[in-house]
Amino acid sequence: MTDEVITRHVLISGRVQGVGYRAWCRREAEERGLSGWVRNRQNGDVEAVFSGPPEAVEAIILACRKGPGWARVDDVEIISDGAPIRGPFEMRATR
């Protein structure tokens, strides 16, 4: 078992607002024991930061490519890596 923690900042585009995507994302992150946050963006995308064990972060990014049932995901773009984040996964206000 490793104590390695990675952080990925991602943008998810498609029909990802108004379909429960943020709540789904929070549940998926919590189930994987991840820290970070998710929020809607004013342009219709969803933005998220996932921090935790590499296999869990990679798994949620893969899951984000499908999303919840009503979503239509066109793209998941990893826009940066970052410093580890600690604490609970949160839903943040639109920005």
Image (spheres, rainbow, N blue to C red):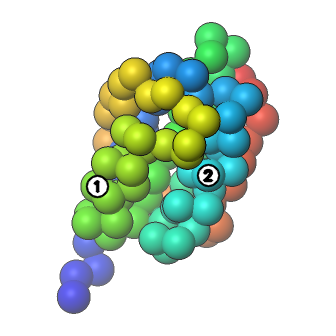
Per the image, the residue denoted by label 2 is 24
Residue found at x 32% / y 42%: 81
| Side of 46 relative to 74 (left or right) | right
Residue found at x 28% / y 55%: 58
**Which amino acid, mark 1?**
Glu
Q: Secondary structure at mark 1?
A: helix
Residue found at x 60% / y 36%: 70
Report the residue that reaches farthest toward the front. 69
The residue closer to the viewer here, 94 or 66, is 66
The residue closer to the viewer here, 77 or 35, is 77
Q: Secondary structure at mark 2?
A: helix
Q: Decide which of tag 2 and tag 1 comes sooner along the chain.
A: 2
Query: Of circles 2 and 1, which is in front?
Result: 2
Report the residue that reaches farthest toward the right. 93
The residue closer to the viewer here, 40 or 28, is 28
Q: Is residue 18 above or below residue 35?
A: above
**Label 2 to label 1, Cα distance in Å?**
17 Å
| Side of 24 relative to 14 (left or right) | right
Q: Is residue 36 above or below residue 56?
A: above
**Which amino acid, mark 2?**
Trp
Per the image, the residue denoted by label 1 is 58
Toward which corner of the image does residue 77 lie, by quadrant?
A: top left
Give the image location of residue 18, x and y in percent: 73, 29
Residue found at x 32% / y 58%: 59
Answer few, some or many: residues within 10 Å of disc 1's Cα (few below 14, many 20 plus, some between 14 and 19): some
**Image quarter in which the C terminus is found:** top right
Answer few, some or many: residues within 10 Å of disc 2's Cα (few below 14, many 20 plus, some between 14 and 19): some
